[in-house]
Image (cartoon, rainbow, N blue to C red):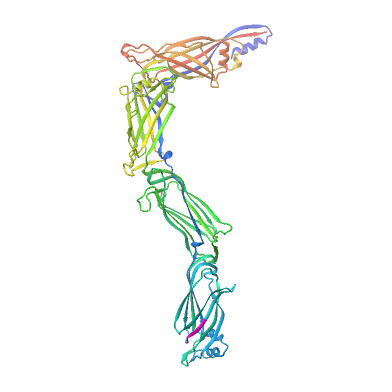
């Protein structure tokens, strides 16, 4: 600034000088607009420029599907032990040839039979022939088998040209020599067969079996010549069947361990759904396997599909385990977007889905050891399901809502005063996005103002149950119910003129109060709401009494270094009032959001803008200039301020006779404020 170098120059001359000087500096400026009374979001300007207040305030909301529907988990368990495992029936053929029998004879008859092979001759009698350790290989079926229950059928066919008598035989394990079966047969004629059955329960079998012919005799051909062929045989056909095992090292065939098809019923505590689309949730499969073979799991919900129409059909594999260390898998398959038919397998139920679980082993051709200690445990089902959309019957829901001091947005920019409005229109509007019958009972609506005044609404629908229109689908249409209030059917004008800031309410809502009236035609989405709005529409036309309006001024304050040696400060204010309302004004000093002082000793009066008698509107601003002194303490506060709030108290003045008694507010109205400082400095160089 120009005077500072001059001061510095004089001080450098070494002479004692002092004088006073004044400088004028801008302090603050700002403008209070109609938008400070009514923000853009709720202000509607008519064609003539007049301003209407149009407010839609949400009073109450129900999120029915989100907050009141809970889908329980449906995790099921299936346990399988070796009781469910079997080895297949298997038949083995083993011939004992005439040549083998002849070679075991030590009397010379055997040698004669072998010598006559291919000829026709009489076969003499023979007795007490035997043949031991004739091998039978059953390892295609098992290597070892601890049989719980099972049977062996033994068919013996005499393919020799002579009768067999006094047949004494046994079968034993090759390794431990334990006899499995033993028996005697008195006679089998040529070409005849006999069938013998043996209980194998409790037996421990080996895959390598030895057959001992302890005795075989024959009366011969009774001197009748017969064809002699040493390849003719006593034919043994063994069938092992119906084997259930305690343990086995065997080649198990492909077989199902679990094959379950069942309906799962949800307990929804009232609602009865026929269809559901899933917003979020998962299919869980946990499997434990001690069998030394892979398990193949297939889980299906035939009536569930994704957004592309692909059926829910999940495949998984559990690796081989052991009795000491179970193999396991934990799977979580997201089901977001899947749709499920909840009418069951035959489409005649509710809250029911049909699912199938198949657990199997495949035949690998390898020997696998399994015992009763081995097991398979499967946990499977749907978990954490949150519906996106449901159809059916939503059940009967009773919802109570009560609020105290719920903030309203209608006049949140006004801090006090009174209004006498020309007219008021208020609608209580209920938007219902839920496809279900509903009924509302409003017990009480009461407003409170900042000054503590309260007004309880008196209207035809208060205290009387009211049916609410339901939403409709295909195409979707939201239900809407409106109750219109005015000063003829309610005290709504009194309520609004009290400048309400808070709301107390007691409301009850019943969903489907008359039960399943439309027979499973209800529906709801996750985001479906039941909302109550207060819609206010009124012209800003009324009689104001100390109506409070405030706004922030832009500070333009010099630095503290330029403000030393101040002896006095004068504030000049130029206020242009474009409202046809007189006002008292005050400016408040804030630091860090805390009020620390006021700028004027008391409220300052400003005149109302003049109203044209023809147009009944103010076309020009009324200028008021104010000059006031502030003390040193106020000035110190002002130097450290970070915010200056300008507040006005508006009052209606007398209007021209043809303009009525209510002042109409237009969008062009505003109050502009300019403030400056005149600072008196005392300079001294001593």
The C terminus - image quarter: top right
Q: Residue at x 37, y 45 (%)?
A: 272
Which one is in front, 49 or 631?
A: 631
- Kindly identify the residue that appears in the image at 35 percent across and 42 percent down: 522
Main SS of the magenta part reads strand
Assess whether residue 247 is covered by the magenta stretch. Answer: no
Q: Name the quadrant containing residue 474.
A: top left
Q: Estimate the x, y position of residue 365 in percent, counting from the top left.
A: 52, 66
Q: Please, is residue 565 above or below residue 187 in the view?
A: above
- Residue 137 in sight from this viewpoint: yes
Give the side of residue 205 with respect to residue 427, left or right: right
Left or right, residue 537 beside residue 134: left
Q: At 47% across and 93% down in the image, what residue appears?
A: 223
**Magenta segment:** 162-167
Q: x, y (%) of residue 110?
A: 54, 88
Whether residue 161 is situated above or below residue 330 in the rendered picture: below
């Amino acid at each position: 600034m120009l005077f500072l170098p001059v001061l510095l120059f004089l001080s450098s001359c070494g002479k004692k000088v002092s004088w006073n000087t004044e400088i004028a500096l801008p302090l603050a400026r700002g403008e209070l607009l109609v938008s400070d009374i009514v923000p853009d979001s709720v202000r509607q300007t008519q064609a003539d420029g007049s301003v209407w207040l149009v407010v839609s305030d949400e009073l109450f909301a129900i999120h029915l599907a989100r907050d009141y529907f809970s889908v329980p988990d449906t995790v099921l368990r299936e346990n399988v032990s070796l009781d469910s495992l079997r080895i297949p029936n298997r038949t083995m053929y083993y011939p004992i040839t005439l040549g083998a029998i002849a070679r075991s004879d030590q009397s010379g008859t055997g040698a004669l039979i072998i010598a006559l092979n291919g000829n026709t001759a009489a076969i003499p009698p023979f007795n007490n022939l035997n043949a031991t350790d004739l091998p039978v290989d059953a390892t295609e079926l098992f290597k070892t088998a601890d049989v719980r229950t099972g049977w062996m059928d033994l068919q013996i066919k005499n393919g020799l040209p002579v009768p067999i008598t006094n047949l004494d035989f046994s079968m034993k394990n090759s390794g431990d020599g334990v006899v499995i079966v033993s028996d005697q047969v008195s006679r089998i004629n040529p070409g005849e067969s006999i069938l013998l059955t043996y209980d194998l329960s409790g037996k421990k079998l080996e895959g390598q079996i030895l057959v001992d012919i302890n005795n075989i005799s024959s009366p011969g051909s009774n001197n009748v010549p017969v064809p002699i062929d040493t390849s003719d045989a006593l034919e043994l056909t063994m069938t092992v069947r119906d084997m259930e095992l305690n343990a086995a090292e065997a080649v198990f065939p492909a077989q199902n361990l679990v094959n379950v098809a069942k309906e799962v019923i949800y307990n929804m505590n009232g609602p009865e759904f026929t269809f559901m689309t899933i917003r979020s949730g998962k299919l869980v499969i946990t499997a434990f396997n001690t069998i030394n073979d892979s398990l193949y799991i297939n889980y299906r919900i035939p009536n569930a599909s994704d957004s592309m129409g692909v059926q829910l059909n999940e495949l998984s594999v559990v690796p081989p385990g052991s009795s000491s260390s179970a193999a396991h898998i934990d799977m979580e398959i997201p089901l977001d977007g899947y749709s499920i038919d909840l009418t069951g397998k035959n489409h005649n139920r509710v809250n029911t889905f049909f699912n199938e679980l198949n657990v199997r082993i495949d035949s690998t051709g390898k020997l696998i050891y399994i015992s009763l200690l081995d097991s398979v445990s499967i946990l499977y089902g749907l978990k954490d399901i949150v519906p996106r959309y449901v159809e059916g019957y939503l059940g009967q829901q009773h919802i109570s809502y009560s609020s105290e001091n719920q903030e309203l947005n209608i006049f949140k920019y006004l801090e006090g005063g009174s209004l006498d409005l020309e007219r008021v229109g208020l609608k209580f509007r209920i938007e219902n996005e839920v496809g279900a019958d509903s009924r509302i009972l409003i017990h009480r609506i009461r407003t409170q103002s900042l000054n503590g005044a309260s007004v309880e609404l008196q209207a035809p629908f208060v205290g009387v149950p009211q049916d609410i229109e339901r939403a409709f689908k295909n195409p979707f249409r939201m239900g809407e119910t409106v109750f219109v209030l005015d000063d003829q059917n309610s005290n709504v004008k009194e309520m609004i003129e009290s400048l309400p800031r808070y709301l107390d309410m007691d409301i009850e809502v019943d969903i489907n109060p008359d039960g399943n009236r439309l027979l499973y035609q209800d529906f709801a989405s996750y985001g479906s709401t039941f909302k109550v709005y207060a819609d206010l529409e009124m012209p800003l036309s009324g009689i104001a009494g100390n109506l409070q309006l405030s706004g922030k001024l832009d500070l333009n304050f010099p630095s503290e270094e330029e403000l030393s040696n101040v002896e006095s400060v004068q504030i000049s204010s130029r206020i242009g009032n474009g409202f046809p309302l007189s006002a008292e004004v005050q400016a408040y000093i804030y630091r860090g959001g805390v009020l620390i002082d006021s700028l004027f000793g008391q409220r300052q009066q400003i005149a109302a803008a003049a109203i044209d008698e023809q147009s009944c509107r103010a076309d020009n601003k009324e200028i008021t200039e104010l000059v006031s002194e502030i003390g040193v303490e106020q000035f110190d506060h002002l130097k450290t301020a970070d915010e200056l709030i300008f507040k006005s108290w508006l009052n209606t003045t007398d209007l021209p006779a043809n303009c009525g008694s209510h002042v109409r507010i237009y969008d062009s109205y505003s109050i502009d404020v300019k403030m400056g400082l005149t600072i008196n400095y005392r300079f001294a160089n001593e």
